[in-house]
Image (cartoon, rainbow, N blue to C red):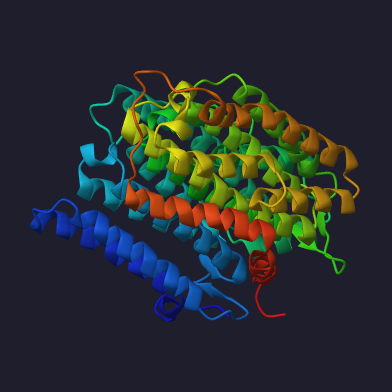
Amino acid sequence: MDLGNLTSLHLFFPELLLTVATLAVVIVDLVSLNKAWPGEVALVSTTLTLLLIGIEPMNGGAWLFNRMLVYDSFAMFFRALIALAALVAVWMSIGSEEVHKCEQGEYYTVLLASTLGMFLMAESINLLMAYLALEFVSLTSYVLTGILKHNRRSQEAALKYLIYGGVASGTMIYGMSWIFGLAGSLDFNVINRVLFASAHVPVLAMFIALVLILSGMGYKIASVPFHMWAPDVYEGAPIPITTFLAVASKAAGFALMTRFFYPAISQLASDGTWQVLSGVAWPQLLLVMCIITMTLGNLAAMQQENMKRMLAYSSIAQAGYALMGFVLLSNDGLEAMLVYLFAYYVMDAGAFLVVMIVANMTGREDIEAYRGLAWRGGAVPAIALAIFLLSLTGIPATIGFIGKFYVFAAAIREQFYILAVIGILNSVVSLYYYMRPVREMFLEQPAEDATPVTAEYWNYGLMGALALATIFLGLYPPPIIAFVSRSMHFFAGPS
């Protein structure tokens, strides 16, 4: 079903709500003297957006706005994940001492606008739309990173992010121009049809184009060698924005990358595997990237003394684990990737939330600040952080174990035995740096001048929900497995 501009709107309600909410935050900030209202409007709007996504009909799908966007179950999964990440980011922002120092109206306006852009990234089936959506998300991300105007670290991070992003963006659009020249269209479905119908696709030109495009999409998911921006940006940005970039931006990047490298330039066979263009070895390239990404991320994280930098390198390693499912060229692998991305959302958001709680109380982000946390009034965040870190390691009875089990099992089923072994060994290595904060919190005595950590009920409510989700979904994963299974459908038009 190919819908025009007006008829597309009835399948576009979450995006319309975010658009209205963004304008509403601007108006509220202008007319109200209460600076808490922009955050409350943003919290309500992200909650309603998530509810709208939840009640949308799960039909076969449709092309929206004259084949610029697509409505299908795959897009619905990522819209839900991004909306959940936005809700957590807004909730954390309301309880963040860092965010209270910046202009509230500007902050929440850009945050909601960035969420809208990520929705469009997940739904794009046109090279031009994909580029515009990714660039819109990048520009808003630069602003959010540097939103602390009087914080030199935040400004430096934003500048580095801008420079890296500009290079990646220019490289990617150059690669897209090659694809347009080879296929004569910007539409993903037309590109697929032309490439597979042609008997003489220039293999070298196609491979170069894919490498150029991968530089932009790889930058968005922070995979090696496009990861250089992540540690500095994660450290310099306000912690709620670090969480948002680590979870929502990465999810949007994986959504766009999957939609391009699978339905656009690959074909699904009857046995559930994907066939790539003969002679175009992008799966082998991504396999090498996957191994290097998780290995470098884990090894670099071992050297970090700042919690945000440690979690930044951990986030790079987590992108490598998710890429394990991506490179298998099968629907089983893609399902495993979606399971892992959801698991990553829960445990990484929880870990950053505890980092924010400690930073609010102590003003510090280094691992030494966690010394004796469990014995100086912070037993609850200490236990929660231990749960999240154990889950990131992949310990059984946590959602992280479920995510890693699915990607490793998918790799073994597809006979990628070496890849599975490398992933397991990397998980063992990660245990070292994930347990360092746990040791500091529970086994070290607090310093005499250590700052007590008092309860912040607003943040504790979210922390408790994420910790319970980490354990509950680790013990009973069928809800998320069923959701992922329903999400594995790319709309390709009438059969």
Out of 161 and 419, give the one closest to the viewer.
419
Q: Is residue 68 left or right of residue 436?
A: left
Residue 122: quarter of image: bottom right
* Residue depicted at x 58% and y 46%: 176
Residue 63 spot, x, y in % from top left: 55, 73
Residue 180 spot, x, y in % from top left: 61, 51
Q: How many marks?
A: 0
* Residue depicted at x 54% and y 31%: 442
* Residue depicted at x 79% and y 53%: 329
Q: Is residue 345 left or right of residue 460?
A: right
Task: Kindly tell me whether residue 191 is visible in this rendering.
Answer: yes
Task: Kindly tell me whether residue 184 is visible in this rendering.
Answer: no
The N terminus sits in image quarter: bottom right
Out of 176 and 314, give the one closest to the viewer.
314
Residue 16 spot, x, y in % from top left: 35, 69
Residue 447 spot, x, y in % from top left: 41, 18
Work out whether 304 lies above or below 171.
above
Q: Is residue 485 left or right of residue 104?
A: right
Work out whether 416 lies above or below 8.
above
The C terminus sits in image quarter: bottom right
* Residue depicted at x 40% and y 48%: 136
Residue 462: quarter of image: bottom left
Q: Is residue 291 left or right of residue 18?
A: right
Out of 199 and 466, give the one closest to the viewer.
466
Out of 157 and 313, give the one closest to the viewer.
313
